[in-house]
Image (cartoon, rainbow, N blue to C red):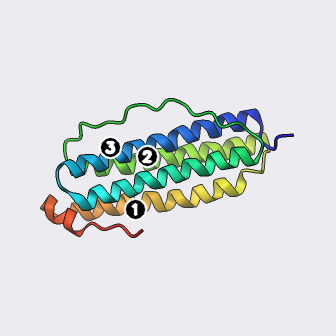
């Protein structure tokens, strides 16, 4: 007997798609910076992409552990025609806010269904999104203080 309802299983599969698309988006941002020799920002967004793939795996593992079925979905092509640093940084923050809203929707679905099993998983993601939004906001705020893209890239580092 599965511990996950069909409705929750479907919703979590949709979230897997969101997490993979997040990784794909950040990977594209990474290579936009790399192509312009802004290696620190390229590394920052590459690490962010890798983190999103880990998030997708957390959802996949949960589905399997609760007797559900992982169904990978087609990913949409991410934006790639970025104009400048600020556009990417603002898009990163907006995207993290979007993902936060998706996690909140999962929480509401869990409550509606009375399906308490995903509570610790979703609590972890709620806490994670606080960090994700803070990091994206800090990157944007820091950029606002620089007048030179090269200097900003030089001072951008990501703790591993």
Picture quarter with the N terminus = top right
Density class for disc 3 (Cα within 10 Å; few <14, some 14-19, many ≥20) is many
Query: How packed is label 1: few (under 14 Cα within 10 Å), some, or many (20 or more)?
Result: some
- Tell me where residue 95 appears, x and y as whole percent: 41, 45
Between 24 and 129, the one lying in front of the other is 24
* Figure check: 106 above or below 132: above
As helix, strand or loop, the secondary structure at mark 3 comes to: helix
Q: CA distance from mark 1 to mark 2?
A: 16 Å
**Looking at the rendered structure, which numbered label has been put on residue 28?**
3
**Mark 1 highlights which residue?**
135
Separation of residues labelled 3 and 2 (CA atoms): 9 Å
Residue sitting at x 67%, y 55%:
121
- Determine the residue positioned at 65% across, 37% down: 70
Return the residue at label 2. Answer: 23
Residue 98 coordinates in the image, percent (x, y): 47, 44
Q: Is residue 38 left or right of residue 134?
A: left
């Amino acid at each position: 007997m599965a511990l996950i309802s069909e409705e929750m299983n479907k919703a979590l599969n949709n979230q897997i798609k969101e997490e993979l698309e997040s990784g794909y988006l950040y990977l594209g941002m990474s290579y936009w910076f790399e192509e312009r020799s802004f290696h620190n920002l390229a590394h920052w967004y590459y690490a962010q992409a890798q983190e999103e793939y880990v998030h997708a795996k957390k959802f996949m593992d949960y589905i399997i552990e609760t007797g559900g079925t992982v169904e990978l979905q087609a990913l949409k092509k991410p934006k790639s025609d970025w104009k400048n640093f600020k556009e990417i940084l603002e898009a990163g923050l907006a995207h993290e806010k979007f993902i936060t809203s998706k996690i909140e929707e999962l929480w509401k679905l869990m409550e509606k269904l009375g399906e308490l099993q995903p509570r610790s998983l979703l609590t972890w993601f709620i806490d994670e999104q606080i960090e994700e939004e803070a990091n994206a906001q800090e990157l944007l705020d820091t950029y606002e203080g620089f007048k030179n893209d090269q200097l900003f890239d030089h001072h951008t580092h990501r703790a591993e």
